[in-house]
Amino acid sequence: MKPVKMITDPVAMELLGDDTRRRIIYLLRARELTISQIAEELRMTPQAIYHHIKKLLPAEMVEITREERVDNFIETYYRATAEVFSFSWGTSGKNQAQAEQRLRDTLMSLDKLGIKVRVEEGTVAQIIKTQGKIETFGSRQELEERVSKLDGVDFLGKQELASVATMISLTDKQFQEWLGLQKELRRLLRGLLTATAGAARQKTRAGKS
């Protein structure tokens, strides 16, 4: 099992919109289980669990670990393919369109936090492009693969190890490029703030001084 797995397929992402499938993956992160065992844990029928497993298998979010004969039956054991799934919407075709729509929804939701922004289509596309560059920067995926095979390191330790190893492995030039991408992302996001939001920030600063 990998500590982190990047998911780029929009169909796979949509699968986790279902609460039952999220609960199944949560169980299978901890240990391998049969369909009957999952059904017992979730108090559902084996048929219902099998329906969800059939969708998670081709999406490579769940995998078969082993089969065991019990009397005249073959019990199949499943587990999650990663301890954490990280989602990247990509920068082309359907992925690009869904990524942009997801970002628009996120930006509109900022209003619930009292943060007023305007949604500009050109800027939305630039933000998605910049996020994609950040997600794929350096050799993090390769390091995560190596870290996932280590023994004697728990899940949180593996995550921290992968993060530290990635940062240490960056050359000074790569770090400056990564920092530049982070600054660009912040600039694009802050550029969407409305004048009202800017005035509110200035008022808050004045009150603190």
Image (cartoon, rainbow, N blue to C red):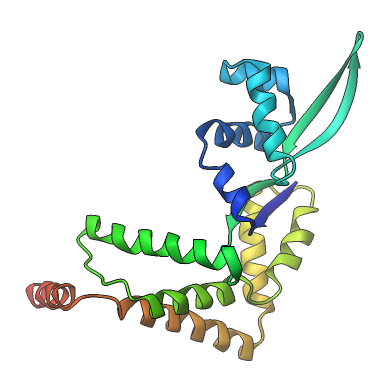
Q: At x 56% / y 37%, what residue is drawn?
A: 22
* Residue 86, placed above or below residue 45: below
Q: Position of residue 147 (x, y in %)?
A: 75, 58
Farthest bottom residue?
173
> In the visual, does 139 lie left or right of 111?
right
Q: Position of residue 92 (x, y in %)?
A: 60, 71
> In the visual, does 110 lie left or right of 146?
left
Q: Position of residue 26 (x, y in %)?
A: 60, 35
Q: At x 70% / y 25%, what residue is drawn?
A: 50
Corner quadrant of residue 79: top right
* Residue 111, placed above or below residue 84: below
Q: Nearer the viewer, residue 41 or 99?
A: 99
| The C terminus lies in quadrant | bottom left
Q: At x 66% / y 34%, what residue is drawn?
A: 30
Q: Position of residue 155 (x, y in %)?
A: 65, 47
* Residue 138, placed above or below residue 6: below
Corner quadrant of residue 24: top right
> In the visual, does 206 lie left or right of 155?
left
So how many labels did they put on this image? 0
> In the visual, does 87 lie left or right of 53?
left
Corner quadrant of residue 118: bottom left
* Residue 49, placed above or below residue 108: above
Q: At x 75% / y 46%, what residue is drawn?
A: 1
